[in-house]
Image: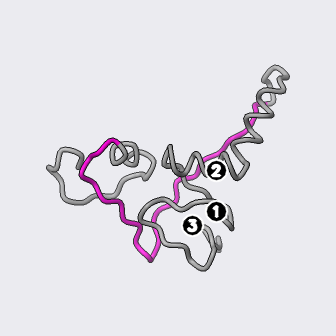
C-alpha cells in the first residue's frame, strides 16, 4: 500500500499511521459499521522492582495528556468514553469513544 501497488486493505491503524505521517499516499478510513478490535494493555508487572518512575509513567499514559499524545503522535486508539482526540478518519459518535458498548 505504501508503494501504491495495492489499492485497499485491512490494516492495524497504528501500523500504518506512522507511514501516513511520514508522507505515504495513504488514506485511512474507519467504516461506520465498525472495525475489528485490537486489544492493548498496559501495566506494571508484579515482579518489577519498586519504582516511582514506573507509576508516574503509567499515570501519564492513562491521563488525558498521555492519551492525546498517543492518539495524535503514535496512532494508538482508545476505548475511553470521552476520548481527548480522534484519529484522522474517525468521526465522533455523539461524544462516544470508538468502543461505545461491548455486548
Answer with left or right where residue 28 lies relative to residue 72.
left
Q: Residue at x 73, y 49 (%)?
A: 63
- N-terminal of the pair, mark 3 or mark 1, is 1
Stretch in magenta: 22-45
Answer left or right for 23 relative to 58. Answer: left
Residue under the image location 73 percent in, 34 percent down: 57
The reply to whether dot 3 and dot 1 touch (C-beta < 8 Å) is yes
Q: Residues within 10 Å of mark 3 (few under 14, many from 20)?
A: many
The mark that comes first in sequence, 3 or 2, is 2
Q: Given this view, does label 3 or label 2 mark the residue nearer the observer?
A: 2
Residue sitting at x 83%, y 23%:
51
Magenta-drawn stretch contains 33: yes
Q: Give me the C-alpha separation between circle 3 and circle 2.
A: 14 Å
Q: Considering only vertical position in the picture, is 6 above or below 51?
A: below
Q: Vertically, is 48 above or below 35?
A: above
Where does residue 33 sit, x and y in percent of width and height? 45, 77
Q: Nearest the camera: 89 or 51?
A: 89
Disc on the earlier residue, 2 or 1: 2
Q: Which residue is at a point 63% across and 74% down the rendered structure image?
A: 95
How far across and how far down the image is residue 38, in percent?
Answer: 52, 54
Label 1: how many Cα within 10 Å (few below 14, some 14–19, many 20+): some
Where is mark 1, residue-wise? Answer: 83
Numbered mark located on residue 98 in the image: 3
Task: Tell me the distance, in whole angstroms, between the alpha carbons under discs 3 and 1.
Answer: 8 Å
Which disc number belongs to residue 67?
A: 2
Is there a contact, CB below 8 Å, between mark 2 and mark 1?
yes
Mark 3 touching mark 2, by CB under 8 A?
A: no
**Residue 65: numbered disc:** none
Could you tell me which secondary element the residue under label 2 belongs to?
Answer: helix
Amino acid at each position: 500500500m505504501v508503494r501504491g501497488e495495492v489499492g485497499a486493505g485491512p490494516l492495524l491503524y497504528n501500523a500504518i499511521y506512522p507511514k501516513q505521517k511520514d508522507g505515504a499516499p495513504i488514506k485511512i478510513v474507519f467504516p461506520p459499521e465498525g472495525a475489528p478490535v485490537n486489544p492493548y494493555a498496559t501495566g506494571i508487572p508484579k515482579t518489577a522492582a519498586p519504582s516511582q518512575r514506573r507509576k508516574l509513567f503509567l499515570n501519564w499514559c492513562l491521563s488525558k495528556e498521555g492519551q492525546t499524545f498517543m492518539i495524535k503522535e503514535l496512532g494508538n486508539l482508545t476505548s475511553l468514553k470521552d476520548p481527548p482526540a480522534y484519529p484522522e478518519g474517525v468521526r465522533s459518535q455523539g461524544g462516544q469513544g470508538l468502543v461505545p458498548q461491548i455486548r
